[in-house]
Each structure stands twice: as structure tokens, then as C-alpha cells.
Amino acid sequence: MLDYSEPVARLIDEFKRLPGIGSKSAQRLAFYVLRRPKAEMDNFVEALREVKEKIVFCDICNNLTDVNPCLYCTNPKRDRSMICIVEEPYNLVAVEKTRSYRGLYHILHGSLSPIRGVGPDELMLPNLLPRLLPDNNEGVEVQEVIIATNPTTEGEATANYIARLLKPLGVRTTRIAMGMPVGSDLEYVDEVTMDKALTNRHEI
């Protein structure tokens, strides 16, 4: 960074802190910012400031929201007998896109990963168990908890941990099915995906 002036070098360093952004990408982003009109960048800065000031965690499901509780938790049309657990807020969006799930959500904001030092205490789990009680769920008893963590080593470990946590409570706990994506070719499917597809096969 010695070739750049101090403000530019600092901007590049800040961009490098973002997930998935390396040195080259950080430099491209920094010079993109420098080329844009000041008014456009003022709007960008204001958007960043506003999101940090106005967005909070929903007290019930941990979703990111500007109203607390969030619109999902307060929607009277949602099925309160079902809770879908996802790792991140953008996973909730993926589930919503199906238009087939009408229950509630619980966002963990991460997954178990001993390598990265992420244990159960780092996940937003403490407010999950109280939600299963009718007294904390508008009088409705939760009939099913769907664990929709990612099909990764961390996601599987998280799913298994939560399943063990819920087992003594007697609530039905399910895991989303995994296997062949629609439109894919068997030739290019890895062995883990193929194994999941065979395990989760169903009668037609």
C-alpha cells in the first residue's frame, strides 16, 4: 500500500475487511469509489449510516429488522405452530422465495465451527426454547421445528446439536432434504450429494 496516498490505502484496507474481498478486489472498489460523483458517494455513506442506526435484531426470531418484533413474527397469517431455523437472514429470503412455507423463523447468525472458534454460546440459540411454549407463542403450541442449516460440515454439526437440544422436549424436529438439484446432470454430481439424494429418495 506504500504506492498509494494514506486515505486511499486506508480505504483499500477497509474494503479488505469485507468477507470475500481480497487485495485486488479491494483496490478495484476503492478506485470505483474515487471515480464516482461526490453526491453519489454521500448517498452511499448515508445508507451505511442509516442501516447501522436503524436495523436491530428482532427480540423473537433474531431477524434483522427496522421494527421490533419483525414483520414475520407479528404477521397474523403466519403458521405459529412451525418454526424454521436458518443460519443467516439471507437464508430466510431463500426459503420465502419458495412461497410454500408460511411458518415462523429463527435465525442463528452463524453455525458451529470449532476451527473458527464458534461454539453454541456464539449462536443466537437462548431465545429458541422459550418460543416453544404456548405462553410465549400467542397460545399456540409449536408442532414442528424445521432445521434448514446449510448442507456443510458446520451446518450438519449445527443441525445435530439443535436436534439433541430439542429431543427431550418431544417436539417434532425435521431436517430439510438434500440431494440432486433440479436441472443438474448426474455426471457432474459429487459423491456426497449423490449419497444424500439416494438416502432421501421417495416413492413415485
Image (cartoon, rainbow, N blue to C red):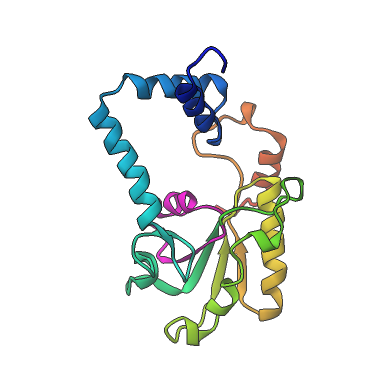
Q: Closer to the camera, 190 or 58?
A: 58
Q: Closer to the camera, 155 or 200?
A: 155
Q: 113 above or below 63? A: above
**Residue sitting at x 67%, y 46%:** 196
Furthest-top residue in this view: 3
The quadrant the N terminus occupies is: top right
Q: Closer to the camera, 36 or 118?
A: 36
Furthest-right residue in this view: 115
The answer to which quarter of the image holds residue 124 is bottom right
Furthest-left residue in this view: 39
Residue 156: % across, % down: 69, 53
Residue numbers of the magenta segment: 87-108
**Residue sitting at x 71%, y 63%:** 161
How many discs appear? 0
Residue 72: % across, % down: 38, 65
Residue 48: % across, % down: 37, 43
**Residue sitting at x 60%, y 76%:** 129
**Residue sitting at x 40%, y 65%:** 102
Q: Magenta stretch: residue 96 in it?
A: yes
Residue 142: % across, % down: 52, 78
Q: Closer to the camera, 151 or 48?
A: 48
